Image (cartoon, rainbow, N blue to C red):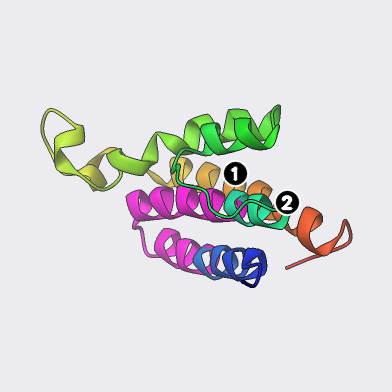
Amino acid sequence: MANRANDWLRQAENDFSWAKDSMDGGHWAQACFTAQQIGEKALKAVALARGASEVRSHSLVKIAEALGIDGDLERMGRRLDLYYISARYPDAFSEGAPYEFFDRDQAAEALRYAQAFLDRARAEIRGPDASA
């Protein structure tokens, strides 16, 4: 079976474009959720590149821990993990729709964090001089 690490990384890169479009359109909750997904796919790409056959978790923190990744990415993952449910489901809040609880600053931060996960995955999979 082929190693699919680059497929996961390419999808994360494509999702980053989608997240930027969401942010530019004022869809900040969607940008935040997509940023979490970008981080997840980037870390799964790293795990596959290191020889994992699959990764079942959706938590950036748990995947990062399993990969021995800590520091800034772990901190960023803690923030992005908060968006996995709350950016999509109304019952994550006592009232209101999720989009009402997100703003441009949160989305901008989430995209910066997603970029950091992409950069880490690119460096590990394609080499330290890899760019978008």
Give the percent coordinates (x, y) of residue 18: 46, 68
Marks 1 and 2, how far apart at CA = 22 Å
Q: Residue at x 79, y 53 (%)?
A: 124
Q: Earlier in the sequence, mark 1 or mark 2?
A: 2
* Of 25 and 43, the residue lying toward us: 43
Vertically, is 17 above or below 29? below
Q: Residue at x 65, y 56 (%)?
A: 48
> Is residue 48 found inside the magenta-colored segment of the image?
no
Q: Amino acid at mark 2?
A: Arg
Q: Secondary structure at mark 1?
A: helix
Q: Which residue, given by chain and number where applicable, does mark 2 sit on?
A: 50
> Is residue 22 found inside the magenta-colored segment of the image?
yes
* Segment tinted magenta in the rendering: 16-42
Seen in the image, is 4 located left or right of residue 126?
Answer: left
Vertically, is 6 above or below 43? below
Vertically, is 118 above or below 4? above
Give the percent coordinates (x, y) of residue 95: 10, 33
Q: Secondary structure at mark 2?
A: loop
Q: Which residue, given by chain and number where applicable, does mark 1 sit on?
A: 113
* Of 57 and 86, the residue lying toward us: 57
Give the percent coordinates (x, y) of residue 89: 20, 44
